[in-house]
Amino acid sequence: MAGIDYWLADARRGQEMRWMKRFAPTHWTVNFPRPMMASVVTTGADSLRVDALFYGSGDLAGLIWEAADGWSHPLLAYETARDFRACVLRFRWRSGGLRQLDETHGPTLTIEGRDAAGNPRAWYVRLWNYASGVPEDAVITLNFAAMEGGFLLPGEADPVWAGDVDRMFISLVPPDYDAGDTAFAGAVEGWAELSDMACDGAGAVLGTGDVMVPEHGLAMATGYDDCFNQTPERVVAAIHALGYRGAINHYVGMSHYFRLERVGAGLYVSLAGGVLNGPCAAWHRDFAARAKALGFDVIWSLSYELFDAHCWNDWKQRAENGDPALTGWVPPSTLLSPAHGGAMAYLQAVAGAFVFIGLEAGLPILFQVGEPWWWVVPGDGRICIYDDAARAAFGGSPVSIASIWGALDGAQCALLDQAGAVLAASTAALCAAVKAVAPGAVTHLLAYLPTILDPRAPEAKRANMPVGWASPAFDVLQLEDYDWVTEGRPGLTARGVELATARLGYPVEEQHYLAGFVLLGSQAAQWREIVAAAQASVARGTAATFVWALPQVCRDGFVAFRIDGEDGMQAFDDVLFPLAIGREASLSPVFSTQIVESPSGHERRSSDWADARLSFDAGPGVRSEADIGALIAFFRARRGAARGFRFSDPYDDRSGAMGQAPGPLDQRLGVGDGVQAAFQLMRYYGVGEDAQGRVITRPVAGTIRVAADGVEMVGGWSHEGMGIIAFDEPPGEGVVLTAGFRFDVPVRFAEDRLDINRATFAAGEAPSVPLVEIRE
């Protein structure tokens, strides 16, 4: 496919838009406190349904409409409109298993915003006061220009000023709600449906994005834990509109799918009453149907990770001292022991339930075992292979491994081999359970390389990339390494993929790659590394490349697109312009400066470009008919201006002074921070903070020299292409990095036409051969 580039959009600026009705069913969301559960799905063009599951007398779910669209991609978001006074909302309300409309704490519309004086306010509008019908089946009419809060009207009327609203939500509570903390003996299910939804008035419509990004060849990965609050219709439509195709790699999550049973003061995952909780099952049935309708397949991803507070204690992996395996999420999740029969049987039941949903929707069954591993404690390298079930599987008294980091002896390596065999047996059993439900299922294994192939733990792969996973144990090997990618360590990515391929034997056409993700909005610059990793995956022929994940794509406004045309031509040929001709070229560096002159003659100058763009004329170097022949051949091979190439600048082609060999201390490369492992070659002009920096993307092979704190490094680094120097290990905090090199300029012919006249050339007139620098 063609190259991939990206753009971070913060708003629509001229892109396609359309009009949507305010309060469109697709754009409502839900929210609620743990451990209860709720979901919202659209059931028609003017209707939606909320399913809820309550575990205590204080549980409350909100069905939410927000004045500002905080969930959609900026190119798809509806406009912010805080004034609701010019609209009337009508809908039919039906419900079951909830407090009824006429009861205390019955469905209430909470409106949050500011009053006419700008003071923060909330109003509580009892829906029963605006209902016509019976308590569980009524038509509600809400005129936001004439609405009053309060339980009893008119005696307790609290006039609503709906001119500056942030959000509003309808509260849904169980029949025994008392705003307290009394635990229910069992889960209580409830539901509400809003149908025949209509919004009228001058404020009834909103502008919303209607972009359709061209297909770019990437696929999307997302997860239920991050989008459970939105309607599946909204989620799947966004993936399609942003140009993603193929399969959606859908992680079913670790905190929202399960049913819970009460034991003492705790709630623990349970198969009582079914496998999946009702709201989760309803959401995923709609998700599967929506995916199929838009031409997507779904890869159902299930991991060994589970929300810690609801995990049975004997199911958890444990370190040698008994500490449970806990991730860094807040609150934490834990990892299920592959050796525990009950834990693995539970996972098999969960997998079967999701696969059955896929079968009901008519989807081909694609199933992923997501990142199965024995947990390694990040702070000290302890491996969690010492839970009671694991100890029993390893003979009762397994050898001690204080830390998996560093060298291990023969007995310790043998224990890791045993752990790997147990892990491989558990994943094989999970896939077998899936195929018992769907015999034609295609199985996938997702391996997280930074943990499995951590350079500090050379033996970790024995336990966490066991030989029992070798082809054909799975149909597809999926690889992920977002820590390496976002830390700028492409060298580790390349070596990790190579090692995984060699160890497990899956050819590249049976591999997928997951690129991402950006954890925080403040880290949006990491999309550059993610796109580069995705492009590298495509270049090596990976069968499918996924972007992880949709919530971060929407938050940061990430837009992927293809470049270089539909034929996949590379825009750059890594060849040098004929050297003899280029030596006599003329040079024109060009900046772009905006100059505004005042009536008094004073000037204000603004530089538009951080670096000069170079133009050359190689014509003066054409000295013979042989040179003309070489030039024409080179021009035709580049297809005129279509393809770039290298050009050796006769006046500036090295890190130091002209005529001197490059030295490792010539130019600043960067300063280590203990995390970043990749640095861009730069050529600076001037001194200090005012120096003008030039990005070097085409260094000359064999000329690069690198130093750390003034000492040349003869190894431990490599040139990854495009002027990126990748270190095997991130340079330490404060280490000053420098480099020396020779470099070429990426250029193209300025025109698609080359004019050469034999008569004028014979008379001594040099042809014009204009070249222009390419920004890379």
Image (cartoon, rainbow, N blue to C red):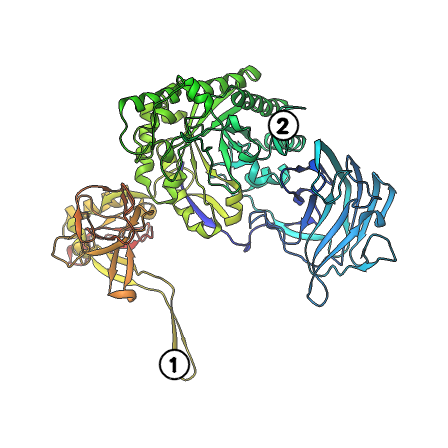
Dot 1 falls on a residue whose secondary structure is: loop
Mark carried by residue 320:
none
State whether residue 767 appears in this view: no
State whether residue 358 appears in this view: yes
| Quarter of image, res 311 | top right
Left or right of 459? Residue 230 is right
Dot 2 falls on a residue whose secondary structure is: loop
| Quarter of image, res 729 | top left
> Toward the viewer: 648 or 48?
48
Residue at point 39% right, 41% down? 483
| Residue, disc 2 | 276
- Closest to the camera, between mark 2 and mark 1, is 2
| Residue, disc 1 | 602
- How many other residues sit within 10 Å of disc 1, few (<14), some (14-19) or many (≥20)? few
Image quadrant where one finds the N terminus: top left
**Looking at the picture, how far across and down is residue 614, in whole percent?**
28, 58
